[in-house]
Amino acid sequence: MKLSAEQIQSNWEIFLNNIKTHISGNRGECLTNFYKRYEERIILMPAAHKKEYHSAFPGGYVDHVNRVVRCALKQYELWKEEGCDITTFTIEELVFSAINHDLGKMGDKDHESYIPQTDQWRRDKLGEDYMFNKKLAFCSVPDRGLFLLQQHDISYTFNEMIAIQTHDGLYDAANEKYLKTFMPEQKPRTSLPYILHQADMMAARIEFEIEWLPKFSQDSVTKSKKNYTLNDNIKSSKTKALNKLSSPGLKNMLDNL
Ligand SMILES: [Fe+2]
C-alpha cells in the first residue's frame, strides 16, 4: 500500500493534534517537542519491516498509531456503555498509551530500527523492504518505548506503563505475568490495558483487510485458472506414465502420488 505525500502530511498533523488535544500541561509540550525533534524519522517510518505485517510502508507507523487512537476512543465508549469502571483511568492515560504504544519501533535516539533492505533476494523472496538496524542493541518494543520516554524526561503513570508494556496482550508471552493470572489480586486494577490491546488488534486487523484482502480476491481468480491448468497437466502426465508401467508395485505407488 502506498500513502500519498498529502496523506502522510495530513496523518502527521492529526498525530500532533492528538497530543495537543489530549495530553495536558507541561507533559503535552514535552511530548510534542520530542516528536518534532524526531519528525523526519517518524513521519516516514513503516509500522513493520516485512510487507506481510501491517502497515509496512512509508508513513505506515503514523497511520497505524492514529488508527489505534481512534479505535481506543471508540472502544472506551463501548466499555463504558457496558459498565466498565472508567474511574480507574483517564482519557489522557488512554490516549497517551495509544500514541506511544509502538514508540519502541523508532529505534534509539541515534539509530532507526528499520532501514532499507540491502539484500535484493530478501526483498524479492521474503517481502522484506526493510531490515532491522544491527547497530541497535536488542530490546522489546514496549521496553524501548518506555526507555525513550524517560530518557527524554516525559513522565508516564503506572497505568500507562502497564498498558504500553502489555499492548500486545497474550500474543507476547512476556505479558503472561500481568494477563494470565487467576489470582484476583494480581489482575490489573484497571481495564485500560485490555482496551488498548483491543484497539491495537482492531487497527492491525483493519489494516490487514485494507491492504491484503483485495490482493487475495485478485490472486484467487488467477490462481484458480493456474491450478486448473496445472492439475490437468499433472493428471495427463500421470495417466501417460501409468500406462507405460508394467510393475504393479510401481503403478500403485505412482497412482497414490
Ligand atoms: Fe500497534
Image: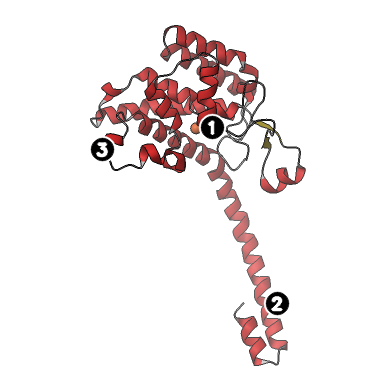
- Find disc 3 in the rendering and name its residue: 184
Please state which of residues 35 and 152 is positioned toward the viewer in this rendering. Answer: 152
The answer to whether 118 appears left or right of 89 in the picture is: right
Vertically, is 206 above or below 243?
Answer: above
For residue 141, the mark is 1
Please state which of residues 231 and 151 is positioned toward the viewer in this rendering. Answer: 151
Name the mark nearer the viewer: 1 or 3: 3
Which image quadrant is residue 175 in?
top left
For residue 15, the mark is none
Residue 148 percent coordinates (x, y): 55, 21
Q: Secondary structure at mark 3?
A: helix
Kindly identify the amino acid type of the residue bearing the numbered disc 3.
Pro
Residue 211 percent coordinates (x, y): 56, 39
Which image quadrant is residue 62 in?
top right
Residue at x-position 45% and y-position 37% = 168
Kindly identify the amino acid type of the residue bearing the numbered disc 2.
Ser
The answer to whether 103 appears left or right of 71 in the picture is: right
For residue 237, the mark is 2
Q: Secondary structure at mark 1?
A: helix
Q: Which of pointers 2 and 3 lies earlier in the amino acid sequence?
A: 3
Residue at x-position 37% and y-position 24% = 159
Q: Quadrant of the N terminus?
A: top right
Determine the CA span between mark 1 and mark 2: 52 Å
Residue 138 percent coordinates (x, y): 61, 34
